[in-house]
Amino acid sequence: MVRRHGVADDAVAIFYQTDIKREGRWVDKSFLVQLGAEAAGSSLLWHKVVCRIPPGGVAFGRPAYAHMLCVSRSRRLPSGRSSADVLPALGTMTWPRAMGTAACEAAARFLVAETDARVVVDPFCGVGTMLAVANAYGLDAVGCELSRRRAARAARLVLPQLAP
């Protein structure tokens, strides 16, 4: 196992991004993440669209969908191990800018089923939705959050209704 910058080559990184509108034009942040990952020597393992509102609905200010991307330097997935490309519902929202529990569960299920990873690191954890879901799936989780108030909420968040 080769390590660069402290991260194993077969490790995965999962990004959750919503697009933004700047001066009347959409900026596809997931595309920028993919470009950055490729520049760092990683390849896209999968890309999912997460519906933030029911398909066909109109959202104002933020898009009706989000992107979830998984990249790795050396890991590859056999074609028979695919999963749904569209998540039709976001799941429970623990706060307005959170990654919904359905998206978090999709990431946790992938980690448990397809990797040896047992620790999730969320560098912008907000109120800790991904951390609580990771814990519910038997994974350890570490989060960083600038806001002390959100960090305190993250430390207390438990989602008992989840069952892996």
Image (cartoon, rainbow, N blue to C red):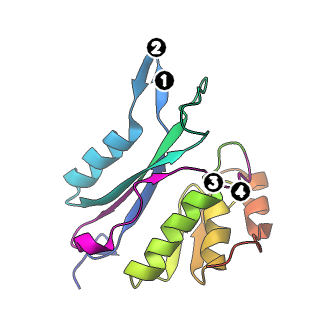
Magenta-drawn stretch contains 81: yes
Apparent side of residue 34 relative to residue 151 in the rendered image (left or right): left
Outermost residue toward the front in this view: 56
Magenta-drawn stretch contains 146: no
State the quadrant of the N terminus.
Answer: bottom left
At label 2, the amino acid type is Gly
Q: Using the image, determine if residue 43 lies above or below residue 54.
A: below
Dot in front, 1 or 3:
3
Q: Quick one: label 4 or label 2, which is nearer the N terminus?
A: 2
Q: Quick one: label 2 or label 3, which is nearer the N terminus?
A: 2
> Are discs 4 and 3 less than 8 Å apart at CB?
no
Q: Which residue is mark 4?
A: 127
Residue 144 occupies quadrant: bottom right
Q: Give the x, y percent position of residue 105.
A: 57, 67
> How many neighbours does mark 4 have within 10 angstroms: few (below 14), some (14-19), or many (20 or more)?
many
**Magenta highlight range:** 69-95
Q: Measure how far apart labels 2 and 3 are at the Cα level.
A: 27 Å
> Are discs 1 and 4 less than 8 Å apart at CB?
no
Q: Which residue is mark 3?
A: 100
What element does badge 4 sit on?
Answer: loop
